[in-house]
Amino acid sequence: MTFILSAIPGFADLADSALLHDQPALGLLLGRISSNAAFGMVRLEVFQAWYKNGDTVALPISPADGYQYSRDELNYCWGSHSTGNPASGWASNGPPWTVWYLAFNVDQATGLVTTAVGYRGNDDHKDRQANTTDGYLKVWTIAQRQRTSLVMAATPYFVAHPSTDFATDKALTQQLLDDLNNSAKAGIAFTEVIYLGEYSNGDTCAAPVSPIDGYAYQPGQIALMTSLRWTMDDNGATPPVATPPAMSKGQLKGWATSVNSATYLVTTQVQYDLSGETDYGTGRVAVFAFCSRTGNTVIVPGLACPWRDSTKQFSGMWIGGIGPIAVPVIVGATYRVQFVSGLWGQGPTPNLTSLGDAGAPIPPGTPSGTGPPSYYCTGLTVNSGAMLGAWVDSAGTVVGTPFVVGLDSGTLTAPAGATRLSLGMNDGGTFGDNSGFVVMTVTTSAAVIPGVADSFSEIPDATFYPGDPLKASTMLQVEKNIEEAYCTPEFFTGTHAHGDTVALPTSPIDGYTYARGELTYIWDFVDTGPYAGDNHNRMVVEQVGVDPTTGAVTINSFETSSSSDGWFANHDGTLRVITMACRSAEVITATGPTVTPVPTTGAGPDASSNVPAGGATGQVLAKVSGTDRDVAWVTPSGGGGGGTHAEPLTDGNGNFIFAGGDIVVVLGVPN
């Protein structure tokens, strides 16, 4: 089912202060929350198509709502669908020529596609060089609305609410409105793609930081994808300029690229074959970070009170702070909260982890409404600024005794009556002057969202106009829309070899199982190996792809040896694949032709596309000028059909000729 919106949604960074208790809940404000949920569904879209040298990637239009993207909202990553000529699928200079270098690019500012493939003669003609614009790229256009201008004043959080929180005649509380507001913004900010730049071997690329709210992503929240820029040498300048490889290196055999997910160290390795195989730390890649804060990651601001139960009040409870970060729970399920990163502070400077200030322990005290919240953690000494937790019911009332989370809560079991795990800071003063946030993971045996989030339904803006009653069913639909936006899209990563099928993923957020039509596959080589032994195999053509209808991975590597004018096929290599999953079939299919695979053995491919049309029985192809591949059908002198001919030679321009001189075999046609 195709996802369609009747109107283009907008974004509003609605502050929690606009939703304070004892203030009217204006329909306009609720409409902004609803619009943010719709915006989250379409904020990140990916378009895909095939492009050749000289093409410019078109500005896409969203099929969901007709939104026209501008160039500054786009990034481009790519994979080499074929290193051959886009028209034939084969190398413009095939055996006895082999690949010398590759260079690909999609300009991030303009969308201009450039491809370059260099060829060298094999051992018997290794001094020959040919520079071509071969290459056919699969390009994924990463479209993110307001990519350079969307800003949130504070890092949002996400909380899922059960349907029972939206019953008729039930109070629309400040806590509920705060949660809806932040969760809608989380559905926008928590999944994004960040272009990190171009890097060479040994470089360290920048760690991704969200341009939306300054959130610094952690290794477990990032999938890194590279796109090959070149296998060539460079001039050592900053930024470097590609130069043809030294002839002494030999012919290209393969390459490998990687980015360490913990240190961001970039490794590029290019292998050449001359009298033996040699690896060089050359080459260059563009790096993209596919980032997600969804799943079991929880962001807890320093402003967050640990609970809002009025029977367990504490100093500063209602002064400038926000409600706790509340994780939905299931009675009997186990939970463990652990610190990942970040700093928060009791004041304008974030300087504490969730352990709090070990130099300022707060001893046990009698709860009176004037002390810190840790007084309710019976008999415990708790650091000032430490993270506290509590089980609460649907009304926010604490169930049982609050507890210390610190750096690691240990394994906890949700008790009877609990619907949420409530998290916040132990602050004995005013919460309104706190700063920063900490990132925690919540490991649980239950789903992040109870129930499957696949019930998005567009809510017209007029629903929230003054004078119309606010129905519980409307607010429940807002919640459902927020939940699906939070899950859209999801990223799944893996490495795959030829013949693999990329598995259908299941969401760790709510257990949703994706269908094939809801998936987009983004890929490039991890390596083109293996290279066991000195087999002197040299690259002629690489053809790669992941079938969108089946998930089947294809790697066709056509090679020749140093002593042969023929070629053979194998399926070496490994692809890095990121599967982008979108519910409601918010997937844009690729446009453009694919490259037809060539036969698996022989002296060249089926190059019928290189053979001129026409001709009569008995006629042959002959050179009609000195221009490469300038041939025509002619009637040979002395009769038709020619005779017996010697083994083919080359004319110095890469064209095959026979010793008799009367028959020309076009480059790429078997002799």
Image: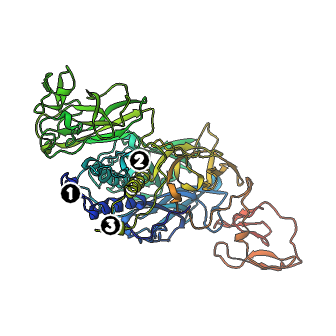
Distance of mark 1 from mark 2, alpha carbons?
Answer: 24 Å
Above/below status of 347 relative to 664: above
Q: Circle 1 is placed at which residue position?
A: 18
Q: Position of residue 566 (x, y in %)?
A: 72, 54
Disc 2 or 3, which lies upstream in sequence?
A: 2
Figure check: 323 above or below 539:
above
- Residue ID for mark 2: 163
Mark 3 sits on what residue? 468
Few, some or many residues within 10 Å of mark 2 (<14, 14–19, 20+): some
- The part of the image, by quadrant, that contains residue 327 is top left
Residue 218 in which image quadrant = top left
Mark before the other along the chain sequence, 1 or 2? 1
Q: Judging from the image, what secondary structure is the residue with disc 3 in?
A: loop
- Left/right placement of residue 329 relative to residue 357 reads right
Q: Amino acid at mark 1?
A: Ala
In-front residue for pair 428/295? 428
In the picture as drawn, the residue positioned furthest to the front comes out as 169
Badge 1 vs badge 2, beta-carbon distance below 8 Å: no
Residue 663 lies, in percent from the top left, at 79, 71
Q: Could you say which is closer to the camera, residue 487 or residue 279?
A: 487
- Select label 1 or label 2 by which is in front: 2
Q: Position of residue 215 (x, y in %)?
A: 28, 48
CA gap, disc 2 to disc 3?
22 Å
**Between tags 2 and 3, which lies in front?**
3
